[in-house]
Image: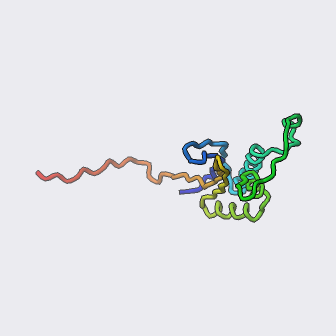
């Protein structure tokens, strides 16, 4: 088997895991591109979950700031924190270089949000001719 790049996905699953939604996928040529794509997807999902009130499409919306609830999970904040953390991204890069699966999961009361990447493998055939199966010995 030989590595043929990295398959990256971002997805969301319902809190009871009964439904899953693929939010995006990408085939990266190398581990560094895979981590870069995941970093940008973390920002995209965080901004969709918790947009900045100054965003152009929210400029006239009647918004009010909601304080973070203590003890409650905040997936947007966790995604932003992962995106800003170079050591955590280096850890992801290290896993991918060793052909191991990388996953980052965060959740709230309604859903789980997944970032993942793994090596894609391509099997090459060593033998191109067809050898029919040898029939089992049959007693006469």
64 vs 18, nearest the viewer: 64
Q: Residue at x 64, y 47 (%)?
A: 111
Hey, which quadrant is residue 71 in on the image?
bottom right
Residue at screen point 67% across, 43% down: 24
Image coords of residue 41 (percent x, y): 73, 48
| Lateral position of residue 99 relative to residue 57, left or right | left
Q: Position of residue 37 (x, y in %)?
A: 73, 50
Q: Is residue 60 visible?
A: yes
Q: Name the residue at the left extreme.
A: 140
Residue at screen point 38% across, 47% down: 130
Left or right: where does residue 82 sit relative to residue 118? right
Residue at 24%, 50% (x, y): give it. 135
Q: Is residue 42 above or below residue 54?
A: below
The percent coordinates of residue 113 (x first, y second) are 66, 50
Q: Nearer the viewer, residue 101 or 66?
A: 66
Q: Position of residue 80 (x, y in %)?
A: 77, 54
Q: How is the image coloured?
A: rainbow
Residue 9 visible in image:
no
Q: Is residue 60 left or right of residue 85?
A: right
- The front one of 128 and 4 is 4
> What is the total number of numbered labels drawn onto the structure image?
0
Report which quarter residue 52 is drawn in: top right
Name the image quarter holding residue 99.
Answer: bottom right
């Amino acid at each position: 088997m030989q590595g043929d790049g990295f398959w990256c996905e971002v997805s969301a699953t319902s809190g009871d895991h009964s439904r899953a939604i693929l939010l995006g996928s990408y085939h990266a040529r190398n581990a560094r591109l895979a981590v870069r794509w995941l970093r940008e997807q973390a920002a995209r999902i965080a901004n969709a979950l918790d947009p900045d009130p100054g965003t152009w499409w929210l400029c006239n919306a009647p918004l009010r700031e909601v304080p973070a609830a203590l003890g409650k999970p905040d997936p947007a904040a966790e995604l932003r924190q992962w995106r800003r953390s170079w050591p955590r991204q280096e850890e992801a890069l290290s896993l991918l270089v060793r052909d191991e699966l990388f996953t980052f999961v965060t959740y709230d009361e309604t859903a789980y949000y997944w970032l993942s990447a793994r090596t894609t493998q391509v099997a090459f055939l060593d033998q191109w001719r067809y050898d029919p199966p040898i029939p089992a010995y049959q007693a006469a």
